[in-house]
Amino acid sequence: MSGTAAEDLVTRAKAGDRHAFDGLVGPLIDQGFRLAFGMLHDREAAEDAVQEAAVRAWRKLGNLRPGTEMRPWFLAIVANQCRTAVRGRWWSVVRLPNQPSLAGPGFEDRIVRGADLRTALRKLAPDHREALVLRYYLDLPVEEIAAITGVPMGTVKSRINRGLAALRPHFEPVEVAI
Amino acid sequence: MDELVRTKMHEALDVERPDAGLRSRVLSSMPVDEAPGRRFRMPSFQWAGGLVAVVLTVAVVAGLLYFRGGVGAHGPATTGPAGQVTMETQLGFRCSLPVFAYDGIAAHVQLPAGTVVNESRPPAANGKEFGGPYGYDPQLGKWLPVQQHAISPDGKYYAYVTQTTGVPGQGPTGTVHVVAVATGRDQQLWSGEGAGQILAYVATGIYFIMSGYLGGPSQNIWVVDPARPGSARRVGPNPVPPASSPSQPSFGPSTFYSLVSPLGIFGQGFNIPADTGKPPAGPILADRVLRMDLNTGAVSTWFVNPSGGTVVLLGLDAQGHPVIGAATGAPPLPAEGSSPKGPYAPMFLPHRLVLLTGENQFTELAPGTDVSFLPSTALGDAHGVWVSVPGSIWLYDRGAGLRKVFTVPDGLFPAPTPPPGKGTPPPGTVFPTPPPGMPTGTILQVAGPCT
């Protein structure tokens, strides 16, 4: 999206044009979900977090200045929502009806293969988990992760390194006995 | 190494992917009755959330200690006396005030004694748990799973909306239902595209709003006579003109519709600047109250906050006049590159309480100088206007003015037990500390007239 087009969308969205808001935030919903699932490891909680983040984004549009990059701005709201959810705000969650699962051939196999790493990710400090998910699951550059998490790039790198160190056994090549 | 980590992370986390309808569902769930950028309203709720969290945590811990002591605790479905509020004024009448707190806790406060009687959780409707907030039907003496404005004037019916989720290229669909309280008979009155919300169930019919965003934003107010479902019609201009000029008040996509009374439909209007092609000079705030005539659809401006700050519609008095909260100051635009999290500024929150009696006519009930007074809802009955404030309930009547009726002791309304798998926050969790002067305490919502 060009800067001019994005600025036009921001201006229109601030004036109450929900179609413009859709144009701004809509393309980021999938990434928002992936970040939220990486943080929360619960599909419903992740959908809740993205939904709440979108509502907050709508309400915070007044803070958005022309030229602001949308992706780090929105993902920062999602990340913040996930931190709140981690604290256990179970009483304020409004659930949507369950959506059909994407389970298909090989689904069980995929679950089993990733289970150990998911368990290990859950044990990480939330800051480290967030940095790893943003870096290696959403493939974002360190600069953008710094913008999303609101910490210096050095801190981001440190969190990534510490997270990787904690997960290192899961990233070693597997030796197969023949 | 990086590529290996990427692969493993995808293996672990791709077990759940966003389904095709997520974008549509999320975007269709936007608060269609709020204009964007109302940045100074959210912090109060964020703090309120924090306060609720603190109160709930304390209540849960207290409940557990109570339980460990061998005595059963009152859960949300418990029936019977629950305690006592602290009376702050002498009332010259007797009545029972229905209130609810948190999810599933409904109670009556017996006035003037201040005795609190907890009651059963309100019933579900159409097989769905509403989860509150709730309304009390004084005619039939029942709690209902909708707010008081969705209950018919005779108390025999209530209305609600069910919603389908949207899919790509197709928006959600809303269906208006009416339920006979005595029999539970549920009748579908109307169905159409958009996200629906009941505005009011009054003598002239059920007013509801349908909002959509596919193909451009749209909001339409409808009214349907429940005795004649085919009578549904839009209220006001058709199509609704866009709210693009501050000089021509109009209900449109940027209006927060809220209240319906025999005097009209009231909504928040925004200080939308003229379309000059440039970004607005200041934040766009809901700084005014618009009124739409029920018959002609003509829109007029009833109140513009002289401070330029936000206004919120809190409720109606018994005659149908809006009771509003108004901020005594307007926030500036944040500086370029500044953090979106501004400092807490009491003047930007609606501490001032105003009763609107006509176009540009109003009575100030509270000046807004007390930052611990932050009204959340208002409900009028024969005794006056009951105003809900964190930690207390107030009453306004023309003779005595605004009085604090009672204070709600902390812990009086126990938090519901966490559902399985949604346990209490982990040890060491630090909740945000409310800023100095921020009102604290349990928020009791008045659920119906005091009878």
Image (tube, rainbow, N blue to C red):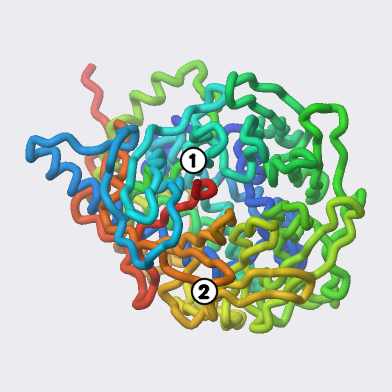
The CA span between labels 1 and 2 is 25 Å
**Is residue A89 visible to us here?**
yes
Q: Position of residue B231 (x, y in %)?
A: 87, 32
Tag 1 subunit: B
Q: Look at the picture and state if B43 lies above or below B329.
A: above
Please name the residue shown 75% across and 46% down the image.
Answer: B213
Label 1 vs 2, first from the N-terminus: 1
**What kind of residue is marked 1?**
Gly
Q: Are marks 1 and 2 in contact (CB under 8 Å)?
A: no
Q: Residue under label 1, please give it.
A: B132
User: In the picture shown, does residue B70 fall above or below A4?
Assistant: above
Q: Position of B45 compared to B179: left or right?
A: left
Neighbour tally class for label 2: few under 14, some 14-19, many 20 plus, Cα within 10 Å:
many
- Mark 1 Cα shell of 10 Å, populated few (<14), some (14-19), many (≥20): many
Residue drawn where x is 38% and y is 25% of the image = A111
Kindly identify the residue that appears in the image at 19 percent across and 44 percent down: B63
**Which amino acid, by three-letter code, is at mark 2?**
His
For numbered disc 2, what is the local secondary structure? loop
The residue that mark 2 highlights is: B351
Residue positioned 57% across, 81% down in the render: B328
Counting from the top left corner in percent of width and height, residue B293 is at 85, 57
